[in-house]
Image: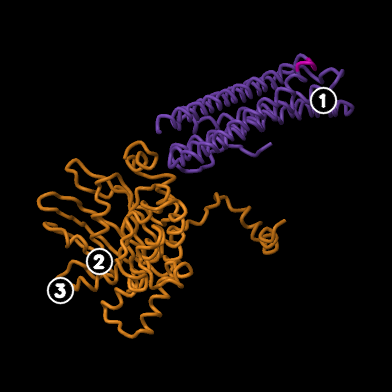
Amino acid sequence: MNTQTRTLLNTGKAASIMTKPSITQFEHKSNNDAPVKVDVKNLQVFYGKFRALAGVDLAVRENQITAIIGPSGCGKSTLLRSFNRMNDLTAGCRVQGEVSLDGDNLYAAGVDVVDIRRRVGMVFQRPNPFPKSIYDNVAYGPRLYGVRRRTDLQEIVERSLKSAALWDEVKDKLGQSGMSLSGGQQQRLCIARALAVEPEVILMDEPASALDPISTLKIEELMQELKRNYTIVIVTHNMQQAARVSDYTAMMMIDEQRAGRMIEYDQTNIIFTRPKDKRTEDYVTGRFG
Amino acid sequence: MRKTFEMEIQQLKDELLLMGSMVEQQLLDAVDALKRRDVEASRRIYAADGKINSKRFGIEEQVMILIATQQPMAHDLRLLASILEVSAELERMGDYAKGIATINIRIGDEPLLKPLIDIPRMAQKAADMLHRALTAFINEDVETARAIPAEDDEVDELYKQVYRDLMAFVIADPRTIDRANFLDWTAHNLERFADRVTNICERTVFIVTGEIIEIGSSSSGDV
């Protein structure tokens, strides 16, 4: 008899469980009580006359990992990029509706876009370190935001690299170029660079699609560590990855007008075992997409 | 990939149906051999249970391979998990048939306490329920799956009847107790067999709806 069983017997818990008629409900890893960190309401994004996103609603919960899945061209990246106004950089892009961070609409007049991008960091598909030293890559953001003292910068660089699970591998070669690292290390360097400015939300657009399986696993494990302190939103084509790493999954598709729409949003455990929408079912079982 | 996967799932379903037919046949044969007091036939039935067990291991292995290689989701995942569950149920049901064969072997040269009437009826009913439950499982026919467990009441009633008859013999002549026990044991095996049909029906509902529910007959658990 294992310890747990013995404890159950001693406390009489087993007896009380046995008398209950209900079927045991395993605890879902997602936390339904987590407050909403990013709230998307009726979001529409246009590129010129083309409507890329139509009426998207999504409540991203704090300290949870939310995966956005769906076939190519369904607007996943467009949605992700609206979380830190990266779409502003695309000519002809227009946004309607609301994206709020802790209740403040990111698209309201007078909002400081630079501050938003500090609070909402981003990691891209291909690792894109600056052609600078490892140290300077991580110190780049803090310097931009005015940190000057050497000891402060050193502390930030070390803390960020440790959080990105890269410190042990690079601590003796911080002066080397970031480009000299392997693909997986470069991606973790980019994560460290994002962490250095102490964001609240981290957006990841296919962060492991250019990496080998071992490096992918490291990134996925890192995400589990990071979610304690950050809210993470990931776009991924890899369904198994979404199933493995995320707490919530949002399924998107294009409609007849080729505009991206949110089809279903639920706990990841539900999306991959008993989705409600037939289109989600068909997508996660590989019938299309 | 999807085409290959669907073909492999179809093969698994065929294997499960075949296993179900084997179990059904074993049950009917076991009761028939008992009725005819054909001990040799019972020995063959006893030995044939090994084939049912191998079938189950084969299905289990194939399901594991599909889970590992295809990473099934949603309906596919529920179907594969349910096939695993149902193959285990069928194996146990095969054990009940084997149990009845064992009884006939153990009775040896003694004549039956009474001619078998209700026991073959129980076997027919239970085998028929299994047949339809498995067809409903393969066809994902929720309506039929929800209806079948209620028929278990009929099997339970027959079991009670058998039990009363046997007790009458024992009260009239306590020396018949061993022979009465053999037949009661047989009826009990049949009653358990029919009970397990309900579990198969519950899996059919699960595949389609994603909900694990207990269907149960009006008197499930009663003896």
* Front residue (pair B4, A60): B4
**Is disc 3 on the same chain as disc 2?**
yes
Q: Which mark is residue A110?
A: 3
* Gap in angstroms between the C-alphas marked 2 and 3: 14 Å
Q: Which residue is mark 1?
A: B169
Q: In terms of secondary structure, where does tag 3 sit?
A: loop
Left or right of residue A131: residue B19: right
- Upstream in sequence: badge 2 or badge 3: 2
Callout 1, which amino acid? Phe
Of badges 2 and 3, nearer the viewer stands 3
Specify the principal SS of the magenta part: helix
> Quick check: B179 above or below B200?
above
Left or right of residue B20: residue A66: left
Residue at 30% x, 74% y is A140
Q: Residue most toward the right?
A: B175
Q: How many labels, in total?
A: 3
Of badges 1 and 3, nearer the viewer stands 3
In the rendered image of the structure, the colour used to display chain B is purple
- Judging by colour alone, the chain drawn in orange in this rendered image is A
Say which quadrant the C terminus of chain B sits in: top right
The magenta-colored residue range is B37-41
* Front residue (pair B181, A14): A14
Chain letter for mark 1: B
Circle 1 residues within 10 Å: few <14, some 14–19, many ≥20: some
Left or right of residue A161: residue B162: right
Residue A230 screen position, x and y as percent = 38, 68
Q: Which residue is mark 2?
A: A100
Residue at 15% x, 50% y is A51
* Gap in angstroms between the C-alphas marked 1 and 3: 95 Å
Callout 3, which amino acid? Gly
Circle 2 residues within 10 Å: few <14, some 14–19, many ≥20: some
Location of residue B87 (image quadrant): top right
